[in-house]
Image (cartoon, grey):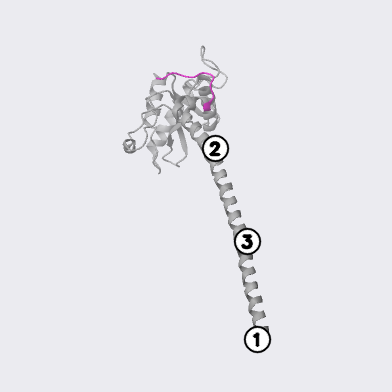
Amino acid sequence: MVLNSVQAEASSMENENETGENPVEETFQQELNEKVEQISPGRDDIPEGIPADEPYMGQEFESEAAAHAFYNSYATRVGFIIRVSKLSRSRRDGSAIGRALVCNKEGFRMPDKREKIVRQRAETRVGCRAMILVRKVSSGKWVVTKFVKEHTHPLAPGKGRRDCIYDQYPNEHNKIRELTQQLAIEKKRAATYKRHLELIFEQIEEHNESLSKKIQHIVDRVREIESKEQQSRV
């Protein structure tokens, strides 16, 4: 009964984000902390039948970051990717008091108006409800108040984050590889064109120099003839 009560009360506060003094909220938070502490088995008292690397109700962490690291490690072992979701803040001082960490396939992708114009993206959200909810209690520790283990999609145990992402976006990965190869080819082609242009400019410069010499030779020859004609008249 206590566990169900805590889950219901924690769920009701997932979207808490107002600020300001509120005696009712402080009393509610104190009662919630007491109930969480009642069900919390402590760090060294893991319930029977639960693996040491799997989250469980009442599990304690020293900080939100520690809870995130634990669930991320668990997700890597099981074969999914986590996403940071809802944050609950205290109405009293605005500090963080709750955080939901969900599977990255949680929810559904909203329709994109541009899909009629651009290529449709691969579907990656399938409404998975796997998640944990951790809340900060009066002791300063963060306690798991909700844990949904089951996923609504196949998992990839033993695969790293990059492999999981490639599994979710196989077409995009292949497209990136193809574009990378095409880019390398185009770079080589551009380098060839550049060299050809440089050769053409070199030939033009050589032709200009040769033409300048010829013109100068003609000018010098004309001056020489004019000088001889003036001397013969004298």
Label 3 crowd (10 A; few <14 / some 14-19 / many >=20): few
* Residue identifier under label 1: 233
Q: Which mark is residue 210?
A: 3
Q: Residue at x 50, y 23 (%)?
A: 75
Task: Please name the residue that numbered disc 2 is placed on.
Answer: 184
Q: Which residue range is magenta in the image? A: 152-162
- Is any part of residue 175 visible from this angle? yes
Label 1 to label 2, Cα distance in Å? 74 Å
Task: State the residue in front, 52 or 215.
Answer: 215
Residue 154: say if magenta.
yes
Question: x, y (%) of residue 135?
Answer: 46, 30
Under circle 2, the secondary element is: helix
Specify few, some or many for label 1: CA neighbours under 10 Å numbering under 14, 14-19, or 20 or more: few
Q: Residues within 10 Å of mark 2 (few under 14, many from 20)?
A: few
Residue at 45% across, 26% down: 168
The kind of secondary structure element at disc 1 is helix
For badge 2, the amino acid type reads Ala
Q: Earlier in the sequence, mark 3 or mark 2?
A: 2
In the figure, residue 6 lies in which quadrant? top left
Determine the residue located farthest toward the top in the rendered image. Answer: 49
Q: Which badge, 1 or 3, is on the more N-terminal residue?
A: 3
